[in-house]
Image (cartoon, rainbow, N blue to C red):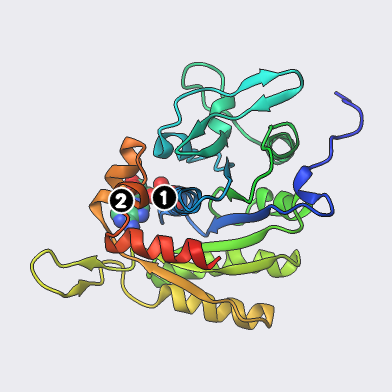
Amino acid sequence: GDRGPEKEIPFNQPGSLTRVFAVASGKGGVGKSSVTVNLAAAMASSGLKVGIVDADIYGHSIPRMLGAAERPTKVEDMIMPPVAHDIKVISVGMFKPPGNTPVVWRGPMLDRALHQFLADVYWGDLDVLLLDLPPGTGDIAISVAQRLPGAEILVVTTPQMAAAEVAERAGSIAAQTHQQIAGVIENMAWLPCPHCDERIAVFGEGGGQTVADALTRTLGARVPLLGQVPIDMRLREGGDEGKPLVLTDPDSPAAAELRKIASGL
Ligand code: ADP
């Protein structure tokens, strides 16, 4: 029904000091959520005030990866987001009906949910807001462009060429909607050999650079490859246990790379 004029989104106000990053990927399973969580944790541990909107309707794995078990509470007309590892987090999964009933999120519904996450959630003064988008080039990318014109896109891909092609397509939406692309992150870049110094190219090589170069051509502005995060079993375990690797083993190669990317943004 008609609920009257929509509330303003604080991040669009002139003078807002919050940088907003939308984390995108061409397909699922490339580590978009893992990267989001670890970037957020790296930023929060360096003293920044950080929030995450988990808008990945298919995955919505952010609360588990952060160990955020609580549900949001309502205070007057605001939604108070749960906090985990100093990160405020709100997820589409927190608004599902009890049980495991799958929700069919149609474009307009998702757009409304996104607006609610941005305007009705009490974020306070954030330094950084990270949005974990669903994979692909769906309606949500358009919603983000309209709702958050100042958001910068971070594209996550694996080194695999098939993944790189779809990642590039996801990124080129930004060109059409005049959004900035902060850069490309190549995840699962290699597996360190457990017995020697060699890097095993499990998913091939070059996907991250290929996407960065292709987006640079499409946008006519340099899109950098921000980093290459190796495969690390503990990164996956940390996700399963709600303890981001950048906090439990910040000097491991994967965590160090993620911290480098976070501090360069
Ligand atoms: P997406 O959000 O793109 O669907 P996820 O972040 O859920 O991907 O990652 C998919 C799976 O791969 C998860 O089980 C995650 O723990 C694991 N994973 C992601 N990145 C890495 C990595 N660099 N090393 C090891 N496992 C990873």
Residue 97 seen in render? yes
Q: Secondary structure at mark 2?
A: helix
Does mark 1's beta carbon lie closer than 8 Å to ligand 1?
yes
- Residue kind at label 1, given as amino acid type: Ser
The residue that label 1 is drawn on is 34
Q: Give the tally of numbered discs.
A: 2
The residue that label 2 is drawn on is 235
Direction from residue 211 to residue 14 in the image, left or right: right
Identify whether 224 is placed above or below 54.
below
Q: Which mark is residue 165?
A: none
**Which class describes the residues within 10 Å of circle 2: few (<14), some (14-19), or many (20+)?**
many
Q: Secondary structure at mark 1?
A: helix
Does mark 2's beta carbon lie closer than 8 Å to ligand 1?
yes
Q: Residue furthest right?
A: 4
Residue 155 in percent (x, y) is at 53, 63
- Whether the residues at callouts 1 and 2 have beta carbons within 8 Å, the answer is yes
Spatial separation of the CA atoms under disc 1 and disc 2? 8 Å
Direction from residue 52 to residue 110 in the image, left or right: right
- Residue kind at label 2, given as amino acid type: Leu
Name the residue located 42 percent from the left edge and 38 percent from the top edge. 66
Residue 244 sits in quarter:
top left
Residue 22 sits in quarter:
bottom right
Name the residue located 70 percent from the left edge and 41 percent from the top edge. 107
Q: Residue furthest front?
A: 47
Name the residue located 57 percent from the left edge and 28 percent from the top edge. 103
